[in-house]
Structure formats: structure tokens, C-alpha cells
Amino acid sequence: MDGVARDKVTNYIAALFEFGETNPGRLMSMGLLYPTDLDETDQRPDEPRRLH
């Protein structure tokens, strides 16, 4: 993972935490899934998605 992608994942996990997700396992899972959610235009949703 390059530095830019690492920064994006780090920021995403921080946003999840700010939105109230505190479970380390869920944060890890969502962080691992996040790169697959990025599209070619690199647009992110306004709010992090949540696992149900």
C-alpha cells in the first residue's frame, strides 16, 4: 500500500471512530474493505458506511 492509500485508510478509520465506531475488530474490517470501495474517481461518501 502506498503512502497516499495508507493516508486515505487512516483518515477513513478516524472518521469511523468520530462517528462512534469503537469496536477494534469492526474498525479493522472496515479499514480492510475501504480500498475496495474506492472507485476510479476516488469519491468518498459524506459519511462512512456501516457494517450491519
Image (cartoon, rainbow, N blue to C red):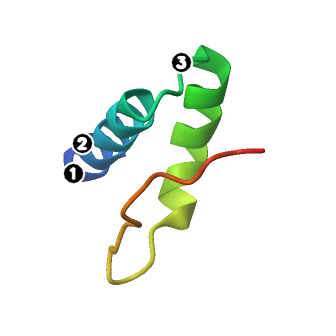
- Residue marked by disc 3: 22
Q: Nearer the viewer, mark 3 or mark 2?
A: 3
Earlier residue among tags 3 and 2:
2
Specify the farthest residue to the bottom: 41
Examine the rendered structure and indicate whether residue 17 appears above or below residue 11. Answer: above
SS of the residue under disc 3: loop
Circle number at residue 7: 2
Label 1 crowd bin: few (<14), some (14–19), many (20+), radius 10 Å: few
The percent position of residue 1, horizontal first and vertical second, equals: 37, 45
Earlier residue among tags 1 and 3:
1
Q: Kindly identify the amino acid type of the residue bearing the numbered disc 2.
A: Asp
Name the side, left or right, on which 22 lies relative to 1. Answer: right
State the residue at coordinates (45%, 68%).
38
Label 2 crowd bin: few (<14), some (14–19), many (20+), radius 10 Å: few
Q: Kindly identify the amino acid type of the residue bearing the numbered disc 3.
A: Thr
Q: Nearer the viewer, residue 25 or 48?
A: 48
